[in-house]
Amino acid sequence: MRELFLAETISVSYGKKQVLDSCSFSLLAGEVTGILGKNGSGKTTLFRSICGQLPYKGRFLLEGKDLHRLSDRERAKRISYLPQRHSIAFSLPVAEVVLLGVSPWLSLFGQPTKAQRQAAMEALSQVGLADMCHRDFLTLSEGQKQLCLLARTMVQQTQFWLMDEPDAALDVENKQLLFTQVRQTVAAGQKTALLALHDPQLALTCCDRLLFLKDGALAASIAPKTATEAEMMAAFGLLYSKTRPFLRQGKWFLDWEDGQ
Amino acid sequence: MQKQFANKWIFWFGAALVLTGAAFVVSLCVGRFPLSISDLLTGQELPVRVFWTLRLPRTLMAVLAGFVLGVAGSVYQTVFQNPLASPDIIGVSSGATVGAACAILFFGGGMAVTAALAFVSALVTVFLTLGFSRLSGTRRLSSVVLSGIAVNAVTQAILMLLKLSADPQKHLGAIEYWVMGTLSDMTASKLPLSAVISLVSTGAILLLHRQLLLLSLSEEEAGMLGVSVEKMRFLLLVFATLAVASIVSVTGLISFVGLLAPHVARLLTKDFRLPTMVFGGILGSLLLLLADLLARSIGTADLPLSIFTSFLGAPFLLFLVLKGGKMA
């Protein structure tokens, strides 16, 4: 598999406090990568750096192009970002929220084309919200809003999906819908996705590879499909001392001590 | 569902246009010198002259000013992500007032010089605000707001000094009257320049409505959808300021229209797109037409506009807020 995204010795500081310390990793086309870490480990800082919202040392390369040299528009044609919480404060029909995803592809005064409107409707169908296309986005449940934003991510047609705890507001059924959609689209389009997650079991279920971030440093990187039990124990032990990964019928599960 | 949607727009636009059209016709006829359609059709010299030189320009200015303030108000509220944002937030109003006060005090207070100085002063104030916020080196919205507060405070202090030095009999009243806005001095010669600047700026705002929509999101989310947040914010604020300054330099300050019209439009349509912006503009025109009608009909002399825009607008906004609260 070809390497799509490369982070080279990324360091970020808030004043004198070092939040990310020489983090290096790569993401492969067609793979979904999860990033695990406790609160304050630097996940959001890493995401904000990739988005160009924070100054950093090091280099981010997407298909060989340095992100630092890209304009906002060019970056948005390559990376889409699904925030943990949306910031839509005004009433808008659901279909229009999805169409915001085509913005990087429009000129300054441009309007979405018929084909783009159709693509938005298809994306809404894929996430099960086609019937709600005219509804006010603000009246949707938090889970439906997140699915609507996933549809927006889909129409943005980028190679790299960046998702900050996308499951935060979803029930079990919608979680499954979201992650299935992400996996299918990433695999079919040879894209790559980086997901910040808090639930290690969910990460094991839906990610091809896992990055473990601890105190601002990348502590481990494993691919569950090929990892040995010892490697899994070592990686998960870094963050979750009370867990024990075990393999059952070709799938990894986590056993929590003390009945957790 | 699509049909329901179209019906909603037809209803709101239809109602607003009919009411505005009716207010427009009444405004043409009512005033210190009443006009009737038969007077105009028979071609009597005085009514025709009053119509072309005074009444029509005044009524057109009311429509234009209301529309422009309504659309520009939407820009300020969106860019600052604050439903209470108005041109004051970056110093447009206070800057224009300082310019007008200078014109009244030092240049005789002629109409042309007052308009010119108010316009230039408003722009200088806004560019100072935006310039200081850029110097802070951050793209945060708060830096623009804080710069606006600082520049506003300085312009208010200058205004106080100007008022202190003003002759209470001669100049102070003129400054205060300017601050409350009026269309009574409106003539045909004043309309074209103001109309061209404000319409071009408003047209640019309407063309950039998708960018404005994106600016209503957080900086992070807007940036990741391809918007150069800082540049676009600057561009839209400059267009909105040009539009507002070109109006208030001629009419004096008109309060409440820019705040009220976009709010009412959004509350009624439950939408936030181009049609709602235009609808807000039409509501602004309607409000100003009605306010101007009252300003010239109550009392023997023309009263300031802001009294009536506030008296008409505030209860309606309160009604909508209370109704909305009950529905929620």
Image: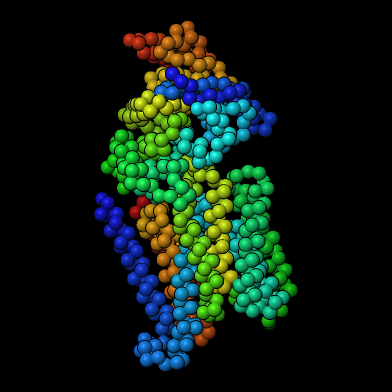
Quarter-of-image position of residue A49: top right
Q: Position of residue B203 (x, y in %)?
A: 47, 61
Q: Is residue B51 above or below residue B23?
A: below
Q: How many discs mark residues in the rendered view? A: 0
Q: Quadrant of the C terminus of chain A?
A: top left
Which of B107 and B253 lies nearest the eye of the viewer? B107
Frontmost residue, B261 versus B5 = B5
Query: Residue B196's x, y, as percent?
Result: 52, 68
Q: Residue at left 53%, top 80%?
A: B187
Give the x, y percent position of residue A36. Answer: 49, 22
Residue B152: tell me if it is visible: no
**Front residue of A227 and B196:** B196
Who is closer to the viewer here, A155 or A229? A155
Residue at image point 26% right, 50% down: B1
Residue at (47%, 34%) from the top-left corner? A78
Residue B201 in view here? yes
Give percent across and percent down for residue A219. Answer: 55, 17
The answer to whether residue B103 is above or below residue B157 is: below
**Residue drawn at x 37%, y 73% as measured from the top left:** B21
* Quarter of the figure with the N terminus of chain A: top left
The image's colouring method is rainbow
Indicate the quadrant where residue B47 lies.
Answer: bottom left
Picture quadrant where residue A126 is located: top left
- In the picture, measured across the screen, residue A125 lies left or right of residue A156, that is left
Q: Residue furthest right?
A: B165
Against A41, residue A242 (above or below) is: above
